[in-house]
Amino acid sequence: MDTIDLLLPYYKINDTTNFPFVSPSLFEYPYKAPFYDKENKFYSVYKKENIKGTKQYLPTPVLYTNRRLYGCSPYLYIEFSIPKLLFGNNYKEVTNKDLKKLPKKLVKKLKLMGIITTEEAIKKARIEKLHFGKNFLLPDELTLKTLFDSLPRVKFPRLKGKPLYYDNGGTGYKFYCKSYSILFYDKMSELSLKHPDLVERLKKKGINNLLRMEIQINNRLKLENTITGLGHKGNNTFENFVRTEKLKSVLEKFLWTLHKNAPLIFMRERNPLRLFQSIKSASITEKSKIFTLLTLQQSIGRIGTQELFSCIKLHGSKGFLKKYNQEISTNIYLQNIFLKLLSIVKDYKPIQNSKFDKNKFINFKL
């Protein structure tokens, strides 16, 4: 789990005898004037200058008041990254034991910012949005590159796709719609900017390639539908939902959908028998057609195969290429990449002081 947005309602304003307590003076309107959206909701953001001289990670509080119910107590949103609050970075991953400590730690952080609340209020807070994140240790740079090259050809249902570009040469890909998105990006490039000391320690352990996957559900209704659709019961509150078992189930759901919609990727095999066996098809006719195309691609490359079919102008060659033009990868680890990632999620062992095990990545089990 990564970013979470909690809603703590009915805050007491300037009433130190009751809990929770927050002073409006800690907040300011974002445009130096009362700001409200189309639903007549007022928003006021926390003044960053209230906290000086601290480099520790702090949550982002926002006050909200409904104009139609003007005069009622405001609502307080608290947004923060769970691993960053616990560890200072989102490379390390949480255990259920870590999550039990989170309310107490969050209460202390908010108190430092002048906002008084209780652990019970945090536990009962409603989740407005939640980002599910998982880091994957990869064997080499080619695995990372070939995965990003193949992602644009994955057709995820009802989602658009676009490449991402980060500072320091980092790349990624995003599937998105209005209510949620799925991201894959080069986590090592991001860490090298924000946590260079951590990157140096990771490389000493043999960890050079790190893939980050995030499922960002930014709509409360979509979040509730997702978790109930997976068979989870109960209210959408912090204490009911923030557990690693539910993290796993959401990641598994989306990885399985990605696997079903991904293009077939085959290993480069010089042995014709092994190449033929690697082709996924129940039809001998289709298997033979794909084998023919793959054999040509091995000999003269993908572009050369396209040029050959273009030159000979055989009837139906364009449709043949469109249907069977699969990628042959020189990367032996990439076959069934989403199933490999799924197996890592199923066997969830939080990354904290991990070393990369190449054999485990190759010999995965479901």
Image (cartoon, rainbow, N blue to C red):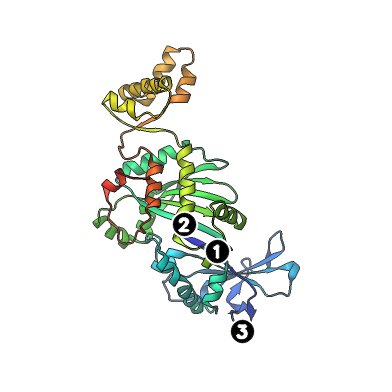
Does the image show residue 207?
yes
> Which residue position holds label 1?
5
Which residue occupies the foreground of this view, 358 or 13? 358
**Residue 143 picture location, percent across and down:** 34, 42
Tell which of 192 and 92 is nearer to you.
92
Q: How far apart, in angstroms, are the residues tagged by discs 3 and 2?
A: 35 Å
Q: Position of residue 285 (x, y in %)?
A: 42, 19
Q: Name the amino acid type tagged 2.
A: Leu
Quadrant position of residue 57: bottom left
Is the residue marked by circle 1 packed among few (<14), some (14-19), or many (20+) residues within 10 Å? Answer: many
Badge 2 local density, few (<14 within 10 Å), some, or many (20+)? some
Judge whether residue 168 can be spotted in this image.
no
Residue lying at the far bottom of the rendered structure: 17
User: Which kind of residue does numbered mark 3 sit on?
Assistant: Asn
Tell me the amino acid under the disc marked 1.
Answer: Asp
Cα distance, mark 1 to mark 2? Answer: 16 Å
For marks 1 and 2 on the same chain, the one whose residue lies earlier in the sequence: 1
Mark 1 or 2: in front is: 2
Residue 78, by quadrant, is bottom right
Callout 2: SS = helix
Mark 3 highlights which residue? Answer: 18
Q: Along the line of sight, which residue is nearer the eye, 8 or 344?
A: 344
**Residue depicted at x 52% and y 42%:** 161
Please provide percent x and percent y for residue 203: 27, 55
Residue at label 2? 247
Query: Image check: 319 left or right of 359?
Result: right
